[in-house]
């Protein structure tokens, strides 16, 4: 590690001096330590240094997340995220001291792609942790809460986000004497917006002081309470406030298609289509819950006469539910692309939620931050088209993306064998299964559910931003929410 410590000092100096050539040279040097000939500890630290170096190049070269629209591809943003994700995956007891730095820098890097919803709860804002990471995290998270609040359709949600930002800024100010991070100190003391929050927040937000505790779970049966608590903890409710609290006030899927302009006489088709895909997502979420928690009637798996491959193959009903949830998530994404296609008048006949489709339909459109977010989120799930200068070096920003694609292909078009171990007693020449463990399938499904939920939020904010721009033709405004079905009516339809 002594060589890496020396390298780290050189990286800090080059970053401080904003010396592009030195940074490029150090990237070549640090990359040598990422091969498997080095220990996980060394590789973790090297990826962390590489993330920081590429992050500085983002600033020097003024890279922008919208660069995919004009072939000015933000390669350093992608590289920064790639390296920090790999560093995070390699954290161990021996590198625990830099965990908060890695996680904080990764959250900041992902926001460069406009994907702030996904990282709101990844910043480390615990001021008991040594170093500058908590101070950087608190300021970054507060700023993102304020920025997101401007694009939420519900006025009450907007104020709750701003209140949570105020609390973070107040907490930061109370601890600012414990850091010598000059940029944060200067921002806290001189930024007009932050000063306004600090000076006026206590009085303005006083009525919201107890907002998180205004609801209880007393009305729920034990079964329903367990399900809703699981959703709250996983931040899986289609509700922006579940990103800022896991208390019972957030246990409803309240998100609606935003207020929007349509021609006179046109129906509320965007709002209704969004409700349909939201319903589909919520059903997938419940399937995942039952699958994760082994909730399934035994009789359904009786007398099936299934072949045993002697590798502890999992044919359980609960695993089938997880597979169904996994499959439905992709269906929801394609439905989301269809809503996007119709609302933004793309006119596409071959609709799919993919980087290629988004690029083809939005490359020449006006910049919309949340279309950028949808583009980059899609890159986490699908092969990106070859648009970088050296496509052989392209890596999707999500290390799990390749595995997710393989699982999806096996479920849809092949054979996914869910088993605890790889079978070793058979000749494998004719084994065309793609093998995953139940734990791997669950982890990927939960990750996918979170991404789909985020995509739904980004779409509503993209619409809100588009409506605010005033580019839509004149007509009537469809207000959100519309006439909402009673829960009793939905359950009695059949």
Image (cartoon, helix red, strand yellow):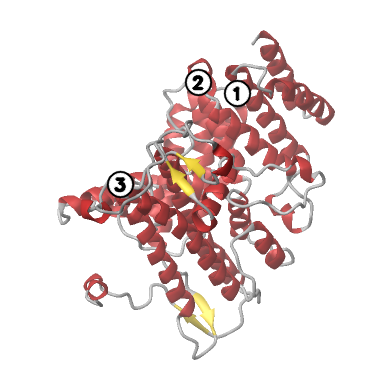
Structural distance between the alpha carbons of marks 3 and 1: 32 Å
Helix, strand or loop for disc 2: loop
Q: Residues within 10 Å of mark 3 (few under 14, many from 20)?
A: some
Mark identifier at residue 44? 1
**Mark 2 or mark 1, earlier in chain:** 1
Element assignment for label 3: helix
Residue 447 in the figure: left or right of residue 398: left
Quadrant, the N terminus: top right
- Specify whether residue 351 is in view: yes
Q: Which residue is mark 3?
A: 230
Query: Is residue 355 depicted above or below 308 in this figure?
Result: below
Please tell me in which quadrant of the rendered image residue 60 appears: top right
Query: Residue at image x 55%, y 46%?
Result: 432
Q: Residue furthest front?
A: 427
- How far apart, in angstroms, are the residues tagged by discs 3 and 2? 28 Å
Q: CB under 8 Å between callouts 2 and 1?
A: yes
What residue sits right under mark 2 in the picture?
Answer: 92
Q: Tell me the residue at 17%/55% (across/down).
A: 220
Q: Looking at the picture, tell me which residue is in the foreground, 347 or 26.
A: 347
Q: Is residue 209 left or right of residue 414?
A: left
Question: Horizontal and vertical percent for residue 206?
Answer: 32, 49
């Amino acid at each position: 590690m002594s060589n890496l410590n020396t390298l780290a000092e050189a990286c800090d100096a080059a970053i401080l001096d904003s010396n592009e050539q030195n940074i490029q040279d150090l990237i070549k040097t640090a990359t040598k330590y990422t091969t498997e000939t080095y220990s996980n500890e060394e590789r973790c630290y090297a990826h962390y240094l590489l993330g920081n170096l590429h992050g500085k190049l983002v600033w020097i070269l003024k890279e922008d997340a919208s660069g995919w629209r004009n072939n000015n591809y933000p390669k350093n943003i992608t590289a920064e995220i790639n390296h920090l994700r790999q560093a995070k995956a390699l954290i161990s007891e021996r590198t625990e001291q830099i965990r908060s730095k890695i996680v904080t820098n990764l959250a900041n890097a992902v926001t460069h792609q406009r994907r702030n919803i996904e990282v709101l709860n990844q910043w480390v804002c615990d001021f008991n942790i040594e170093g500058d990471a908590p101070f950087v995290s608190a300021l970054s998270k507060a700023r993102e809460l304020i920025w997101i609040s401007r694009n939420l359709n519900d006025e009450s949600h907007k104020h709750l986000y701003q209140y949570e930002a105020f609390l973070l800024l107040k907490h930061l100010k109370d601890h600012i004497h414990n850091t010598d991070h000059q940029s944060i100190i200067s921002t806290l003391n001189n930024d007009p917006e932050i000063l306004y929050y600090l000076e006026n927040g206590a009085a303005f937000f006083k009525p919201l002081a107890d907002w998180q505790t205004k609801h209880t779970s007393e009305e729920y049966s034990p079964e329903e309470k367990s399900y809703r608590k699981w959703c709250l903890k996983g931040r899986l409710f289609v509700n922006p406030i579940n990103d800022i609290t896991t208390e019972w006030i957030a246990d409803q899927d309240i998100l609606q298609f935003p207020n929007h302009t349509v021609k006179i006489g046109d129906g509320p088709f965007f709002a209704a289509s969004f409700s349909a895909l939201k319903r589909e997502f919520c059903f997938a979420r419940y399937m995942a819950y039952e699958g994760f928690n082994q909730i399934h009637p035994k009789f359904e798996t009786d007398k099936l006469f299934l072949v045993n491959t002697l590798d502890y193959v999992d044919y359980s009903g609960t695993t089938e539910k997880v597979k169904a949830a996994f499959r439905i998530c992709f269906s929801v994404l394609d439905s989301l692309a269809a809503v996007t296609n119709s609302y933004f008048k793309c006119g596409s006949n071959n609709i799919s939620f993919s980087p290629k489709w988004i690029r083809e339909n939005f490359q020449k459109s006006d910049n919309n931050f949340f279309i950028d977010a949808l583009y980059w989120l899609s890159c986490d799930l699908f092969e990106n088209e070859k648009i970088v200068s050296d496509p052989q070096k392209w890596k999707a920003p999500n290390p799990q993306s390749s595995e997710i694609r393989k699982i999806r292909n096996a479920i849809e078009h092949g054979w996914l064998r869910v088993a605890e171990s790889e079978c070793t007693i058979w000749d494998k020449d004719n084994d065309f299964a793609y093998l995953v463990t139940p734990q791997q399938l669950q982890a990927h499904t939960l990750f996918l559910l979170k991404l789909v939920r985020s995509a739904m939020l980004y779409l509503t904010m993209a619409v809100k931003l588009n409506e605010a721009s005033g580019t839509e033709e004149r007509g009537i405004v469809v207000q959100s929410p519309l006439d909402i079905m009673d829960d009793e009516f939905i359950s009695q339809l059949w």
